[in-house]
Image: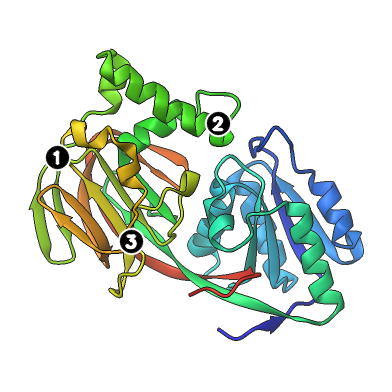
Amino acid sequence: MPAMELKYPVGLISNTNAKKVRKTIVDSKDLHKLLGGDKYCLLRDTSSLEELKKVVSEFRDKNIQIILSNGGDGTHQKLISTLIHNFRDYSPYIIPLKSGTMNMLSKNLGLDISPYKVARWIKTLIEQKAKAKVVQKHILEIKSDALKKNKYGFVFIAGCGYKLLNLYYSYPEGGKRAAAKTIVSSMGAWLTKDPLARSIYTYTPSKTTIDSNEYNFPYLITVASTLEKLVLGFSPFAVKSKKDGFFFMIDGEPMRKNYRFTKFFKPFPDDEWKPKRLVSKGKTLHLEVSGGFSIDGEIVNIDGKAKLEVVLGPKINFISPVIQK
């Protein structure tokens, strides 16, 4: 998409439930002041999906074209899901701020900086009548009879990744330190045959279909994403694959191979198709999950086992300071 000129007023939605990042809470009122106050910025704090829906409706009625989302990946996902489920006729340009526990979306858009710096950048662009780069990214759509309605997000994780996130959220400090602690402590406990660690690193039996290709082996972890860089720079995908669709990695190799965690930081950009390890891109993914899954760091629990379908959802408009490849 071509560059566009940003104009006042802009909208600022802040999730009052967003968790701390680096032990610092991003103050929505300070962001509001940086963006020019009431005359130029509509600040709306939300704490529920119903409040968020009302705010989006208000922004649509007032023709707000730029929305800054103050929170983490879960906050941005809820905003985008609200737009998809309830406001298909409204497609604002979103600027996701790095203000939550998980900040993968902002990282992939070149916004892995202080939200205050982003606010100053937006203000400068508007005042100088400069052109902003518009980036479109597909969001994933997750379908299942076990869900009340389809889920949307940029990063889908099932298997031990879903269980590790549950452990991660049990550590109050959050951030990279908690992520590293989760991995190291759980894998160390697995060596000592700790029951909790063993339950995390169990394999999920699944009949899996990628586009028209069928597989039948239990997986330890499955990741699907339209983003290349995940938590801690975790990027197991074939990032230079020219195939259409979203990235995926399905790993069912023996635990002795998975204990070398560096294998998940993909050193080479090639597709990797082994009997029990698949890394590439695809347009559809059918699989079975046990207990639930994660979407953009948010936990979705399911009773027992369920069949899921992951496909490309709509394209979302973002404002980014970098040119996307």
Look at the numbered disc 2 and give the secondary structure of its residue: helix
Residue identifier under label 3:
247
Q: Is residue 148 visible?
A: no
Label 3 Cα neighbours within 10 Å, binned few <14 / some 14-19 / many ≥20: many
Task: Single out the mark in the foreground, 1 or 2.
Answer: 2
Label 1 Cα neighbours within 10 Å, binned few <14 / some 14-19 / many ≥20: many
Taking 310 as reference, is 240 above or below it?
A: below
- Residue 130 in the image, given as x and y percentages of width and height: 78, 81
Look at the numbered disc 1 and give the secondary structure of its residue: loop
Residue identifier under label 2:
177
Taking 325 as reference, is 282 above or below it?
A: above
Q: Which mark is residue 218?
A: 1
Q: Is 182 left, or right, of 177 in this rendering?
A: left
Mark closer to the chain start, 1 or 2: 2
- Residue 239 in the image, given as x and y percentages of width and height: 36, 64
The answer for how far apart the CA atoms under marks 1 and 2 are is 30 Å
- The coloring applied to the image is rainbow
Q: Amino acid at mark 3?
A: Phe
Mark closer to the chain start, 1 or 3: 1
Taking 304 as reference, is 110 above or below it?
A: below
Determine whether label 3 and label 2 are within 8 Å by CB.
Answer: no
Quadrant of image for the N terminus: bottom right
Mark closer to the chain start, 3 or 2: 2
Q: Amino acid at mark 1?
A: Pro
- Residue 31 in the image, given as x and y percentages of width and height: 81, 53
| Residue 242 image-quadrant placement | bottom left
Taking 186 as reference, is 68 above or below it?
A: below
The answer for how far apart the CA atoms under marks 3 and 2 are is 26 Å
Residue drawn 26% across the image and 28% down it = 201
Q: Which mark is residue 88?
A: none
